């Protein structure tokens, strides 16, 4: 919306850096900083060794601390690409004639942006989000290996290396189901984002 402003330029630089930076390299840097140097966050596993003896609140916080770095890094690369895609869509939409008409009718800038422009700019992004759900399994292989988290991605990698075909086929089947569910969620989200689309 505020194209070529200082905020737009700063965020564009940060997004380009985040998009170009290898996530596994960033993961190692953050592990050294927050895990080794500062000691704020654990760098491996999903829970501490004394997890069973912790009270409920402390056990929950222990899980949260173990998940902060993996979840943040897993979302980092995807958000960098989506934000660039969303920005280009938004800049294209706000130049359309119906946006000019909405402003000429006296609608507030907030209503023009959030009610008319944003909904139309979201449609291509919804498609990408729906198709990216199965990629969570493949992308998790790197993070589960780096952070030593026993998950589906690591299981898939170990099964491929061991030629455990039943497990590989089972995980691929789950990926196919997630693809179908992602497309279904995307189709339903179209109707929410764009009132012209109705699912009967």
Image (spheres, rainbow, N blue to C red):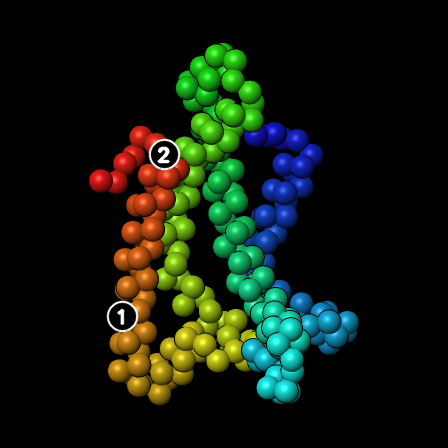
**Point 63% across, 36% down: residue:** 8
**In the picture shown, does residue 175 fall above or below 50?**
above
Task: Determine which quarter of the picture holds residue 27.
Answer: bottom right
In the image: residue 174, left or right of residue 81:
left
**Quarter of the image with the C terminus in it:** top left
Q: Are marks 2 and 1 in contact (CB under 8 Å)?
A: no
Distance between the alpha carbons at the discs numbered 2 and 1: 32 Å
**In the picture shown, does residue 28 fall above or below 124?**
below
| Extreme residue toward the right, this view | 38
In the image: residue 54, left or right of residue 22:
right
**Percent of width and height locating residue 166:** 26, 82
Label 1 sits on residue: 173
**Point 52% across, 25% down: residue:** 111
Q: Residues within 10 Å of mark 1 (few under 14, many from 20)?
A: few
The kind of secondary structure element at disc 1 is helix
**Percent of width and height locating residue 112:** 50, 24
In the image: residue 132, left or right of residue 25:
left
- Is residue 44 or residue 190 the one in the foreground? 190
- Is residue 200 or residue 196 the one in the foreground? 200
The kind of secondary structure element at disc 2 is loop
Task: Determine which quarter of the picture holds residue 49.
Answer: bottom right
Label 2 sits on residue: 194
**Point 63% across, 87% down: residue:** 53
**Percent of width and height locating residue 83:** 52, 45
Task: Determine which quarter of the picture holds residue 147.
Answer: bottom right
Give the mark, 2 or 1, whose residue is nearer the N terminus: 1
**Point 31% across, 85% down: residue:** 163
């Amino acid at each position: 919306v505020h194209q070529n402003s200082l905020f737009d330029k700063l965020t564009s630089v940060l997004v380009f850096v985040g998009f170009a930076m290898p996530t596994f390299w960033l993961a190692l840097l953050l592990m050294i900083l927050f895990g080794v140097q500062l000691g704020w966050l654990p760098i491996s596993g999903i829970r501490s060794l004394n997890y069973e003896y912790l009270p409920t609140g402390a056990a929950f916080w222990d899980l949260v601390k173990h998940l902060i770095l993996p979840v943040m890094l897993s979302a980092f690369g995807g958000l960098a690409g989506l934000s660039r895609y969303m920005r280009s869509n938004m800049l294209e939409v706000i130049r359309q004639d119906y946006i000019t008409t909405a402003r000429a009718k006296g609608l507030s800038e907030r209503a023009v942006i959030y009610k008319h422009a944003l909904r139309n700019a979201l449609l291509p992004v919804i498609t990408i989000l729906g198709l990216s759900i199965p990629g969570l399994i493949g992308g998790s292989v790197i993070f589960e290996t780096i952070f030593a988290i026993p998950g589906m991605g690591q299981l898939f990698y170990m099964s491929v290396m061991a030629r455990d075909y039943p497990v590989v086929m089972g995980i691929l089947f789950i990926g196919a189901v997630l693809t179908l569910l992602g497309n279904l969620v995307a189709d339903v989200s179209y109707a929410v984002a764009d009132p012209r689309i109705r699912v009967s």
